[in-house]
Amino acid sequence: MNAAFYSALIRQSESAYAGHAASVMIEADPALEARFAPGAHGRWQDNNAQRMRELAAALDAQAPMAFGAQMAWNAHAFQVRGLSVEDLEAALKALESILAAELPGDAASVLGPYFEAAREALHSGERSVQSVLNPADETDRPVLKYMAMALEGRQDDAVDFVREIAA
């Protein structure tokens, strides 16, 4: 079985894998629910589903480093928002173990280089993403918060946030 086969399976069941990973994460670290309240499970399911889409795209391109680059960007986004990259690493670990257990054949060996590239990106400490926005600048923080909500797929929350600060 090849990368394209696993990409198709991941895309087909991304929501189920993402939800399962969110449950595993919260079970392993109950404080995660409080840190990401309200709706921690749903928020992590959405986040994990995005990781599944990124993994599937990297599999389609047969480019493990593409998945690593996405994880580096996500780690940067977490840091900018004052979130722990360890939570992102926990998500990666949960997704890897679930996919290895659930996907048929030699999934672990096919997916292994992709997850290794992602782990290396998380541990490298290098964040290649450059921004003119400064999280230490009080005037930039609302922009970063809006962007984070939009990138998380929380468009309604982002619009409400803009309305709130404009009022």
Image (cartoon, grey):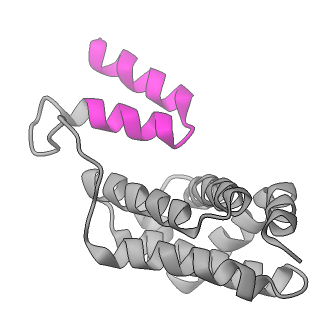
Query: In the picture, residue 144 is in which quadrant?
Result: top left
Which x, y percent locates residue 62?
67, 64
**Residue 7 image point, x, y percent:** 79, 62
Magenta-colored stretch includes residue 144: yes
Compared with 59, 118 (above or below) is below
View extreme (front): residue = 62
* Main secondary structure along the magenta-highlighted residues: helix
* Residue 25 visible in the current orientation: no
Determine which quarter of the picture holds residue 55.
bottom right
Residue 39: % across, % down: 57, 53
For the record, the magenta segment spans 143-167
Q: What residue is drawn where x is 52% and y is 81%?
A: 116
Quadrant housing residue 115? bottom right
Give the left or right position of residue 102, taking residue 40 as reference.
right
Query: Of 109 and 85, which appears nearest the observer?
Result: 109
In this orientation, does residue 139 appear?
A: yes
Q: Is residue 33 left or right of residue 134?
A: right
Number of numbered discs visible in the structure rendering? 0
Image point 39% across, 55% down: which residue? Answer: 73
Residue occupying the far left of the picture: 137
Which image quarter holds the C terminus? top left
Percent coordinates x, y for residue 43 in the rendering? 57, 53
Residue 27 counted in the magenta span: no
Q: Residue at x 38, y 34 (%)?
A: 147
The quadrant of the image that shows the N terminus is bottom right
Q: Determine whether, in the image, residue 139 is placed left or right of residue 131.
A: left
Left or right, residue 155 beside residue 6: left
